[in-house]
Each structure stands twice: as structure tokens, then as C-alpha cells.
Amino acid sequence: MNENLQIALDANAERRITAREQALNSLSEPWQILRQRAHNVRLQTINNLDEYLDQFTNQAKNNGMIVHWAADAGQAVQTILDIAREKRAKLIAKSKTMVSEEIGLNNSLEAAGFQVVETDLGEYIIQLRGESPSHIITPAVHLRREEVGVTFQEKLGIPFTTDIHTMTAAARERLRRTFIEADIGLSGV
């Protein structure tokens, strides 16, 4: 295994263990009860999914949204491409969405000539490196500060640093411009 990857994963695991313990200690009820309650809600939702989807659709429409349904990944991608073309978009600001990863949305948008910029910091770092996310929650978990510093130096043109505040400030500045200049904002689940 890559030594840098192991170091990064070990550090992440330690942070997650500590955060989990703190979260569990802050609960007003035993976590087992809360987990069972969440399981019951999930089961109720799945068993009545059509009803909840109708409820969501109606509420979204009442809030002025347009809801699009797609039978499969290809149809979903085509719908999004059609919307982007209709809006004559060039730049798309995209928030973290696992569905877009699953359907290969970025590749399809870029192949059609759209510039897609990830706005989640971890996803942005991965995009700058031309990689795929390594984890559903922390897409850049496999990277060490030094690697991110080199990436920002090469791709953003900032002096090399491993200072987290400096790197996040540089990313925030670039992403702020993306938010302002984007023709379309895209988010999902």
C-alpha cells in the first residue's frame, strides 16, 4: 500500500473515532434507540416511496420548482444536458452529489463543452488533480497536506504551502468567482 495513503487514512480514522465518541456522548438518548428510530423512518419511507415522491414533487412545484423525472442514468444526463443547452450555459457550479458520480454527469457535461467546477472543497481538490473521489464523505481523504499544497501551487498558481487556512482561502477565492460567474448551479443527492 502507498505509505502516504496509509498515513492519511490513519489520521482520518483517528479524527473520526474521536468525533464519533464526542457525538455519542452528546446524545440525549442511547444511540441504539436513535438508530432503531432512524431505521423505522427509513423503512416507512421505502414502504411508501410513491407517496413521499408525490408529496415532494407537489411541494417542490408549489415552491416554484420544475421537477424532472428520469427512467435511467442516460435519460437523467440527457435532461440535464438539454437544460444546460437551453440556458446557453458555459460554466456550471456543482455541489457535492453522489448521484452525479454514479451517472458520470461531469464527463458528459464536459464532453458536451460545458465547464463544470466542483464547489465542495474535497471534490474541488480531486477535480484539480483529475482523480475520482476516494470516499463518499471525504473525497480527498487519501491526500496529505503536502500533496494538496503541490496541487494548489500547480493548478491555482499560489506559492507552495501546507497551511490549511492559506489553502482554503485560495480555494474559497476561486470558488467565490465560480459562484458569481456560473450560468447554472447544480446540486443533488
Image: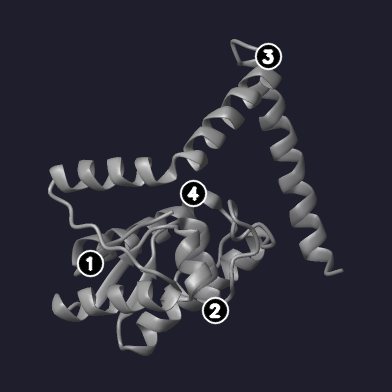
Residue under numbered circle 2:
130
Q: Which residue is nearer to you in this view: 76 or 98?
A: 76
> Dot 2: what SS?
loop
* Residue under the point 37% across and 70% down: 117
Q: Is 6 on the left or on the right of 135, as rendered?
A: right
| Measured Cα–Cα span from mark 4 to mark 1 | 28 Å
What is the C-alpha distance between the residues marked 3 and 4?
Answer: 37 Å
Q: Position of residue 138 (x, y in %)?
A: 60, 53
Q: Circle 4 is placed at which residue position? A: 165
Q: Are marks 4 and 1 in contact (CB under 8 Å)?
A: no
Closer to the camera in the image, 49 or 20? 49
Camera sees residue 101? yes
Query: Which residue sits at x=14%, y=43%?
Result: 62
Question: Which sits earlier in the primary sequence, circle 4 or circle 1?
Answer: 4
**Residue under label 3:** 30
Percent coordinates x, y for residue 17 in the rendering: 74, 35
